[in-house]
Image (cartoon, grey):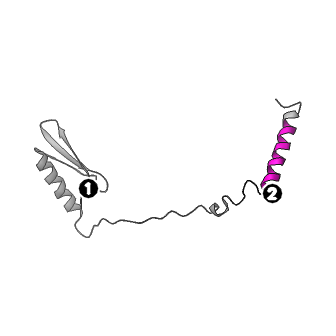
Amino acid sequence: MQIPVLVERVKGNGYRARGSEPFAISARGATRKEALAKLRAKIKSRLKNGTEIVGLEVTAQPHPLMEFAGMYSEDDPVVQDWKKAMARYRRKVDEHPELP
C-alpha cells in the first residue's frame, strides 16, 4: 500500500514526514530517510492488533421527488395553461394602481 507523505525540512537541519488521514501522524528525523523510517514504524504500529483499512462503497440515493422531474414537457397542455395563467396574473399585478 502506498500513501501520500509530505516530507519537509525543519529548523535545525532535520526533516519531518507527515501522512494524511487515516494516518495523520508525523515523525522527525535528522535525515529524510530517518524521518520516513520513523513514520513507517508509527504507521505499522498503528495497524497492529486487528486494526485495518478498508474501502467502503457508498451509493447515493436519488431524491424522493426525482421520479417526477421532467414529467411535463413544454408542449404539455397543463404547462401551456399554467403559463397563460401566470401571464394573466402578471398583467393584472402590473396594471394595479396601488402597487409600486
Given the image, on which type of amino acid does mark 2 rest? Pro
**Magenta run includes residue 23:** no
- Residue drawn at x 67%, y 58% is 70
Pick whichever of labels 1 and 2 is earlier in the sequence.
Answer: 1
Residues 32 and 50: in front is 32
Q: Residue 84: where, in percent of width, then height?
A: 83, 47
- Residue drawn at x 13%, y 40% is 14
Q: How crowded is mark 1: few (under 14 residues within 10 Å), some or many (20 or more)?
A: few
Residue furthest out toward the bottom: 50
- Residue drawn at x 81%, y 45% is 86
Residue furthest out toward the front: 75
**Magenta run includes residue 80:** yes
Residues 13 and 59: in front is 59
The answer to the question of whether label 1 and label 2 lie on touching residues, with beta carbons closer than 8 A, is no
Q: Residue 51: where, in percent of width, then height?
A: 27, 67
Placement of 66 over or under 16, stated as above or below: below
Q: Residue 67: where, in percent of width, then height?
A: 64, 64
Q: Is the magenta stretch mostly helix, strand or loop?
A: helix
- Could you tell me which quadrant the N terminus lies in? bottom left
Q: Residue 77: where, in percent of width, then height?
A: 81, 57
55 relative to 29 in the view: left or right:
right
Question: Residue at label 1?
Answer: 3
Residues 63 and 81: in front is 81
83 relative to 27 in the view: left or right:
right
Residues 33 and 12: in front is 33
Question: Residue at label 2?
Answer: 77
**Secondary element at image label 2:** helix
Please tell me the numbered disc located at residue 49: none
Residue stretch rendered in magenta on the structure: 76-93
Q: How crowded is mark 2: few (under 14 residues within 10 Å), some or many (20 or more)?
A: few
- Could you tell me which quadrant the C terminus lies in? top right
